[in-house]
Amino acid sequence: MKFTADCGPCLMRRVLFQSRLAGNGLEFDAVKAAAGELAAGMDPSMDSVKVATRVHRAAYDAIRIDDPYLDLKVRADEAAAPIAAQLEAIVSASDDPLRAAVMGAVVGNIMDFGTGTAIDDPAMFPSVYDGMVEQGLGLDDTEELRKLIGDSPGVVYMFDNCGESVLDAVLIDVIRGMGKRVVGVVRGAPILNDVTVADAERSGLDGHLDRLLTTGKFFIGIDWDDVPPELSAEIGSCGLIIAKGMANYEATSGRDLPVPIVHILRTKCGPVAHSLGVPQNVNVVKVIRPQRIHP
């Protein structure tokens, strides 16, 4: 996705939120550094994730903390654990385990702190979860997802937020129960409240996967211009990507990948909702297939 005017204030709100999480009084420095990067990169021809990555890199350097979201990430995993246990029971009793697991996973995407359009405290998650499940899917390609899983040797599953990933594990168990290999992909370095290797190991997420890889760097979503060779090989051999969350969608929208990609997310911002052709604040399962023959 390209950078829009809406992206600017959204980024700066997130910068202020995370700099105050640090609690070391450097929020002014963080906002100033981030604003400088934003001013330099703010252009409608730029990829939104590349601008956002530079803005957050400047803010992190200014607050001098590698992972300001760490406490929130731990609490998010803890808040999601009882919901995941309930989801497991629902999935086990369901006539359609895949659809039930997808619904739980998509609602988990609300755990996106500091955006101003989601929740800012993990303790809020249990109180909003059931209502969001009842909303159903505003864009529903679940049946196409089912066929793609059946036709593919495996799945590359690209994670987004902590807490959310605890619910993703339930969906991954269903996919593996369909006889498919699942390769998980987390961020290459702490950025926002997204899952890293350390987070996956702490929460036990790694135990639900056949293999765990990273995006290889500090980046919002994934940098498709610099994909680690191991990950590129797994994408080719698995033949299907499931990408959670808006960051992975923003990083991928407009690119023609060699395999189908299924985006599972909640439209928490206007530009993403507009890009998908749905209202803001709806649950989405969207399949995007390759547009040309890839070598």
Image (tube, rainbow, N blue to C red):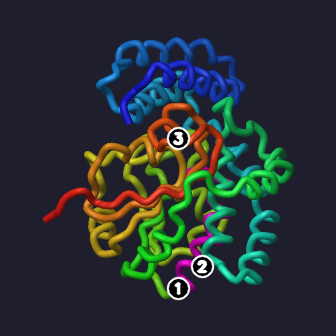
Q: Earlier in the sequence, mark 3 or mark 1?
A: 1
Look at the image and say whether residue 3 sits in the magenta stretch.
no
Q: CA distance from mark 3 to mark 1?
A: 32 Å
- Please give the label number shown on residue 178: 1
* Residue 181 spot, x, y in % from top left: 45, 80
Tell me: residue 202, above or below residue 75. Answer: below
In percent of width and height, residue 238 lies at: 35, 74
**N-term mark: 2 or 3:** 2
Give the residue type that dot 3 points to: Ile
Question: In the rendered structure, which segment of residues is drawn in magenta?
Answer: 159-177
Amino acid type of the residue tagged 2 in the rendering: Val
Closer to the camera: disc 3 or disc 1? Answer: 1
- Whether residue 164 appears in magenta in the rendering, the answer is yes
- Mark count: 3
**Disc on res. 191:** 3
Majority secondary structure in the magenta region: helix
The image quarter containing residue 66 is top right
Q: In the rendered view, does 164 fall on the left or right side of 119?
A: left
**Residue 236 horizontal/vertical position (percent):** 27, 70
